[in-house]
Amino acid sequence: MEGRPKPALPVQLLLSVLIASFLHGFIAYSKRPFELGVPVELLLGTVNFVVVVFLFGSISTIIYYRKNMKLSLVVVPAIIMSLLLTKSDMVWVVVAGWSAVLAPSVLCGRLALYNYSIPRIFLAAVAALVLFGSLQMIPMWQALASSQEIAQLILETETALSASAYSAENAGQIKKFLTFFLRVLPALTVMSIIVQFTLGFWLFARWQFIRGNKNLRPPPFSSWKIPFSFTPLVLSAVLLRLFGNDSMTIVADNLLLILTLLYSFTGISLLGFLMQKSQLSIYLKLIVYLLLFLFHIYGLAFLALIGFADSFFDWRQKYPLPIGSK
């Protein structure tokens, strides 16, 4: 059932979304008439990251307040400006990019209005985000779609390093890192936009919880887990990695990296729950986390493994915390 009518939407929020929309459109899509330099571009990228986080939370709020027409009035002009300022061959990137901002935000607002639970809202919105975000970044990924393209980039880098002051050992390490980085660049970009949306979603849920919507109370981190329905994705990625061609193995590597990071977060959640149930002192908990950090990739693999196992065996439900435990 749809929620009760919402109070009046603050005018300041609409004005803030209007300014943020134009700022995002200009930074992300306008063609630069001259080179701004790496420091300035990095600064603009940081500003755009914060602006997009704000847009995720604010647009979700506007939809939740049923102000669809007002949202159109403040966002559509910025989209038109983005299309006018971008290059002619980048129109699809602009459309997909704005869809990646609007679609998950609209889903958040609408599903929250109908009192869906936070996990369902979040997963549905992330699915829309990954879809449109991937469409936006297809041109960049296509350049890395074949192993020949990657091999050429690696060869050029190796030649440049050999001509510099780098030793053979250092050059080899840099080559390995670059090889891995180029292969998993799609996964890194997808995870980046998921982080942006997660922060924006937290803002939206926090704002509404403060205003009295107890249904949007963020669940404690110790209760986070990946549902069992993700298991087919893991199996598909493993099969692609074992039996696929070069392009399929690149897809598998990126999918496995994303899933590993997701399962590692839930692994940390389960580990925290188990330590809380065992009533470990804060010092022992710090030692456990420090050991995981020191083991680097092995610690990450361990966390992902227990996070994956938790989707089969719900430790929190079978062994709940004592009533009244903090």
Image (tube, rainbow, N blue to C red):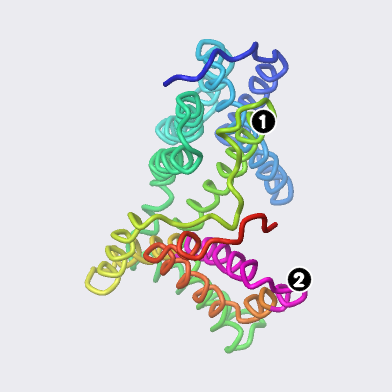
Q: Position of residue 26 (x, y in %)?
A: 62, 30
Residue at (70, 57) in percent of width and height? 326
Q: Position of residue 58 (x, y in %)?
A: 62, 27
Q: Is residue 228 found left or right of 46 in the rendered image?
A: left
Is residue 240 highlighted in magenta?
no
Three-letter amino acid code at the position of disc 2: Ile
Within 10 Å of disc 2 (Cα), the crowding (few <14, some 14-19, many 20+) is: few
For the residue pair 152 and 136, the one nearer the viewer reads as: 136
Residue at (62, 56) in percent of width and height? 323
Q: Is residue 57 found left or right of 11 in the rendered image?
A: left
Residue range (magenta)? 260-287
Which residue in the protein does label 2 denote?
282
For marks 2 and 1, the one nearer the N-term is 1
CA–CA distance in space, label 2 to label 1? 31 Å
Residue at (70, 76) in percent of width and height? 290
From what the image shows, is residue 111 above or below residue 307?
above
For the residue pair 171 and 60, the one nearer the viewer reads as: 60
Within 10 Å of disc 1 (Cα), the crowding (few <14, some 14-19, many 20+) is: some
Residue at (45, 60) in percent of width and height? 258
From what the image shows, is residue 41 above or below residue 317?
above
Which label number is shown at residue 207? 1
Question: Would residue 144 be seen by someone viewing this image from the given angle?
Answer: yes
Q: Are marks 2 and 1 in contact (CB under 8 Å)?
A: no
Is residue 263 highlighted in magenta?
yes
For the residue pair 152 and 240, the one nearer the viewer reads as: 240
